[in-house]
Image: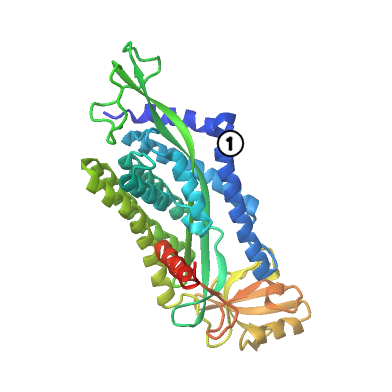
Amino acid sequence: MFPVAEIGIAILRMIPMLLVDPRMAIVFWLVVILVGIQYRRLALLEQSLYGVAKNSPVAQTVGAVVQGIAGGVFGSFLLVLLGVTVAGLGAGYLLLVALLLMTIHPRFMCFSYAGGLISISSLLFGFPDVNVPAVIALVAVLHVVESFLILFTGHLGATPMNIKNNAGKTVGGFALQRFWPVPVILLVLVGLPNGELPPGSINMPDWWPLIKPEEALPEAENILYVMFPVAAALGYSDVAVTCRPREKTLRSSLWLAAYSVSLLVVGVLSSAGWIYQFLAAVYAALGHEAVVLLGRRGQMDGRPYFTAPQQGVRVMDLVPGAPAERAGLGKGDVVVEVNGEEVGGPAHLTQLLAEAGGTAWLTVRRNGKPQAHRLVGKGRTLLDFGFIPVPSEDAQNYVEFRHQGFFQRLLGRLTNRGRNGG
């Protein structure tokens, strides 16, 4: 029987070493800094769009560290259950390639692409020399963790945007971007020639490990697996147009969980031979890309969730701390009257609020029912009052999302370079 409690306690004791031990902590805190930089970039984007950052990059980063540690404990238990060892894993290559891919696009800060590319290179060219089943298992476990992080926190900090969909119309939507530093436990294989196990060792069942190590220790009478903490980075990037951010992250997490579990099965079975390892490596990269592209294609082709009403102004989001939020308005509300006068559209609402002289009574339709709200504040634009309205279909200010995946982008860059003469 697998010693669940003993392994869990050992992991909880080991994780803090990665945060405070100088020999190990430098990599983890470097990942934290990179995560903080990404949240800082999002805050600057929101600042340019709305004049104020909706989400604090410091709070986002601190929350990501806490969430990443929780996810790391869960992922570490799965990795120990599988018996994934550091030897032959190429952890340094994985982190380096993932960080390099992040420079192409933040969402490529993902071990599915890095692990797939490294495994294919190892199988075809012998460099780097890695244990492909272990690499695929690590990628799968990290994505299981990511699916849980997306499920519980992926909708937090969503950035409202005017988005141009595939029909060429400007619609309201939300950009979803989350990043997490994740400490995880891997195993180091140690041979004991005298056959004596040190005090505190945990006896494992005969069927363990599921991922067999490639290294051989012929002189050892007993094999000891030692826990070793390492740092990983996970990222999530998506867009919600046909539904609210919470609903989108629920769907995304379920799709990613299905991919992760199937990849985990493929990784365990890939020990059967070279061709199975190659197929697992290809599936690691292309399977994840398919999950991302399928999710986004539905969002950009489907019917928008936030649509402009025939009369009034629908609220897509609110600026934190601004008059509209203080007045009690919420996402999806439709402002239909100001001081008893019907609202025709965003420009008319701006005019009526400006004429109100600092205090206005708003009639708001929420879930089909009218409500009254007292708004106190002055300004010359809807953003001054804290409104982020649903755009009209012909609005000229928008963000256009491109749906090309990594390999399509790479092919396009090479093709353009060839046309330009190198």
Q: Residue at x 63, y 56 (%)?
A: 40
Instruction: Determine the image quadrant of residue 162.
Output: bottom right
Where in the figure is residue 285, as x and y percent of width and height? 36, 55
Above or below: residue 360 compared with residue 144: below
Where in the figure is residue 234, as x and y percent of width and height? 48, 49
11 or 318: nearer the eye? 11
385 or 224: nearer the eye? 224
Is there any visible trace of residue 302 in the rendered image? no
**Left or right of residue 255: residue 403:** right
Q: Which residue is mark 1?
A: 26
Q: Which amino acid, by three-letter code, is at mark 1?
A: Ile
Where in the figure is residue 67, as x and y percent of width and height? 51, 46
Where in the figure is residue 254, as x and y percent of width and height? 36, 57
Above or below: residue 297 compared with residue 40: below
Q: Secondary structure at mark 1?
A: helix
Q: Residue at x 36, y 66 (%)?
A: 294
Instruction: Determine the image quadrant of residue 385.
Output: bottom right
Quadrant where the N terminus sits is top left
Above or below: residue 205 compared with residue 75: above
Is there any visible trace of residue 381 in the rendered image? yes
**Left or right of residue 128: residue 266:** left
